[in-house]
Amino acid sequence: MIDAHAPVEVFDEIDSTILEARRRVARGESGPVWLIAQRQTAGRGRRGRAWISFDGNLLATYLFATRHPPTTIALLGFATGLALAETIDASLGAGRATLKWPNDVFIDGAKASGIMLDSGALDPQTTWVALAFGVNLSAAPKAIDQPTISLRQLLPPDAPAPEPLAFLAALRPRLEGWAKRLEREGFEPLRQAWLARAHGLGRDVRVMQGEQAIEGRIIGLSARGELELETANGPRLIAAGDVLLPGTA
């Protein structure tokens, strides 16, 4: 699914790399290609939230086509989170990055990166996929629903923040490696590695599904990537939602 040697295209400014991926699909193009923006004017994350752009951050979408089933494509988000966490650790030290279900990378309890997947049918056997993520390398947005942080804040004053393309170059082989393990070995190796970094494991949380709130304690990750909660009414699997830990909005 992931080709570490796919070409990279860089835009000085664009509305959104994921919108550019959609435009290319509409023109009959499906990559593989990395689309990188130095600045985005209309970025969006999950559930329509603004994807705020800062100079020096990594804003990326990887467009590709695959014959893998939707269930496997959905698990690619976990592989991406692990690759991002490993690349962040390479800059800050082992164990600094943690993973918050379903698609955020945290450092020291604050969000440093978010992941989003978009996809659609090219034909009955083939799906186009746009794997998008942003990484706070030089700066972090403040006005969102949870604490945020950038790598720049955690490095010594005289150490430069990683350059976006250099960070991407370090990320790509890690992402390809995890994606290949997913193809060869199934989800279990990723599940175990993800749980080893799980942010909030064993803690009480509130999961928002629209206006509905589900409260419970995070106890694991299912074989399909669902969040496992222990609630007052017994175990429950969560397929989608926003996880709020105590002290967050």
Image (cartoon, rainbow, N blue to C red):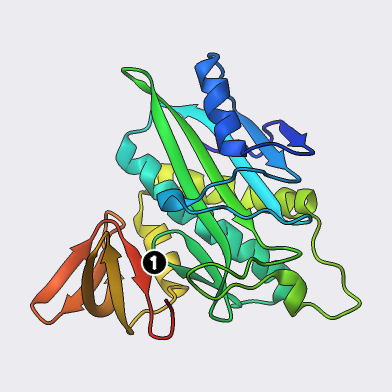
Residue at the location (44% across, 69% down)? 100
5, 162: nearer the viewer: 162
Q: Position of residue 113 (x, y in %)?
A: 58, 61
**Position of 131 relative to 51 (above/below):** above
180 relative position to 175: left or right: left
64 relative position to 127: left or right: right
- In what element is the residue under mark 1? helix
Q: Residue furthest left?
A: 233
182, 230: nearer the viewer: 230
Residue 50 shows up from this direction: yes
Q: Position of residue 43 (x, y in %)?
A: 58, 45
Q: Which image quadrant is residue 140 in?
A: bottom right
Disc 1 marks which residue? 192
Q: Which image quadrant is residue 176 in?
A: top right
**Position of 16 relative to 245 (above/below):** above
Residue at the location (44% across, 56% down)? 78
37, 225: nearer the viewer: 37
Q: Which image quadrant is residue 88 in?
A: bottom right
**Position of 207 relative to 61 (above/below):** below
